[in-house]
Image (cartoon, rainbow, N blue to C red):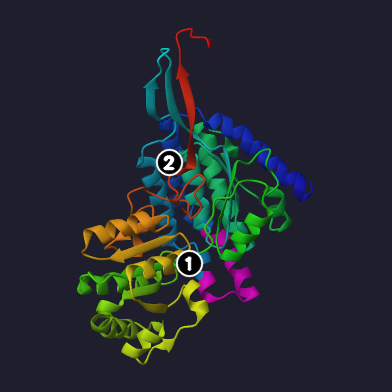
Amino acid sequence: MDVKELVTEVGRKAKEASRKLTYLSTDIKNKVLKDVAARLREERVFLQEENRKDLEAAREKGLSAALIDRLTLSDKVIEGMAQGLEEVAALPDPVGEVVKMWRRPNGLWVGRMRIPLGVIGMIYESRPNVTIDAAGLCFKSGNAVILRGGSEAINSNIALARIFQDALKAAGAPEASVQVIPITDRAAVNELLRLEEYVDLIIPRGGEGLIRFVTENSRIPVLKHYKGVCHVYVDRFANLEMARRICFNAKVQRPGVCNAMETMLVHKAIAQEFLPDMCEDFRAAGVEIRGCPKTKEIVPWVKEATENDWGEEFLDLILAVKVVDTMDEALSHIARYGSNHTESIVTEDYHRGLRFLREVDASVVMVNASTRFNDGGQLGLGAEIGISTTKLHAYGPMALEELTTLKFIVFGEGQIRE
């Protein structure tokens, strides 16, 4: 069959599987997840043989060492996938939870019940461990998932999906609950984005280019974030030692991720005391600093920032620094250049902290904490499928509850509407 027929058939099977998943018991779901974890460990050699095909092709194409590292199914990565599934199995099942009930004057009981979204299409790049992470979360939340990973990981992704499907079959669960589109033709992505009859939500995970392509071409709702331009604002009432620890961690601990700090804003009242030592900390860690004119007056050796630097997601040991005259200026800067991802203030003034929480528009807003905590596991949600910077229907880390929606339920005793 051609690409369109193949992808359509995948979608049809996923829709059929999703209907069966709505009434699959929590015990069976947890059994499958634990079984997949065990099979990943047992079939490590097989997985690494299939992964080796992808690695050899990647080297022939001249992919960078960093991309090859992300592509590799090492013993550590396989164990991490297995442990992740076991952690998901231990989480409460959100499906069927009644979150609210109220009684109407006519005696009707009205409530809201958590239900799966249906069929989720995941489009992602490079890392084959996303195949298992996404499949586990979608399955536990009662959703069928169609996985379209990068062409560079095709053999690894097919092998991982086969292991998951073997566990589904053994438990009597629908095998089409987890499917990988088994071809590398880019036309498959376009066909998936047109499957509005079968797919309820598309989640792209990767670079800004991929996410914009998906958003511009999809007929299906897309849950996305384009980039993470995250700020830490060091307020005039900050504990400066705390601010140094937070800012250093937010930039240096893992600079290539979406919740790393990209711009540091510093109130002018404490800039002269704070910036010299803070910038020396960054310089010792290999961070290139691009500062505004006021920053350069205080720390002359920093590079001069350009307008483009303020909205840039560097994903590297590069940091933009701006001295602001007021908190209002800091809030205006974040509103203009932020990406609705993660924003943090360091302050010992309770009311200024609360104002920051209220006024800043981001999926996670923090007081006296590193931006690096915007992560499902760190926030106590368990695993996550990604971070959404849109507001419909989820905002922030997407864990099990965010992979469900709410429907109304009504209990009556024969009432009719007059």
The relative height of residue 60 versus residue 131 in the rendered view (above or below) is below
Residue found at the far top of this picture: 414
Expressed as whole percent of the image width and height from the top left, the position of residue 265 reads 36, 73
Of the pair 168 and 95, the residue shown nearer to us: 95
Residue at image coords 51%, 55%: 130
Dot 1 surroundings within 10 Å: few (below 14), some, or many (20 or more)?
A: few
As drawn, the label of residue 158 is none
Dot 2 surroundings within 10 Å: few (below 14), some, or many (20 or more)?
A: some
Expressed as whole percent of the image width and height from the top left, the position of residue 104 reads 41, 18
Question: Is residue 108 highlighted in magenta?
Answer: no
Q: What's the residue type where badge 1 is placed?
A: Arg
* Gap in angstroms between the C-alphas marked 2 and 1: 31 Å
Number of numbered discs: 2
Q: Which residue is mark 1?
A: 336
Residue at image coords 35%, 69%: 232
The relative height of residue 236 versus residue 295 in the rendered view (above or below) is above
Question: Quadrant of residue 183 in the image?
Answer: bottom right
* Relative to 52, 413 lies left or right: left
Magenta: main secondary structure? helix
Where disc 2 sits, the SS reads helix
Where disc 1 sits, the SS reads helix
Q: Which residues are magenta?
A: 48-68
As drawn, the label of residue 401 is 2
Residue 127, can we see it? yes
Q: Earlier in the sequence, mark 2 or mark 1?
A: 1
Q: Marks 2 and 1: which is nearer the front?
A: 1
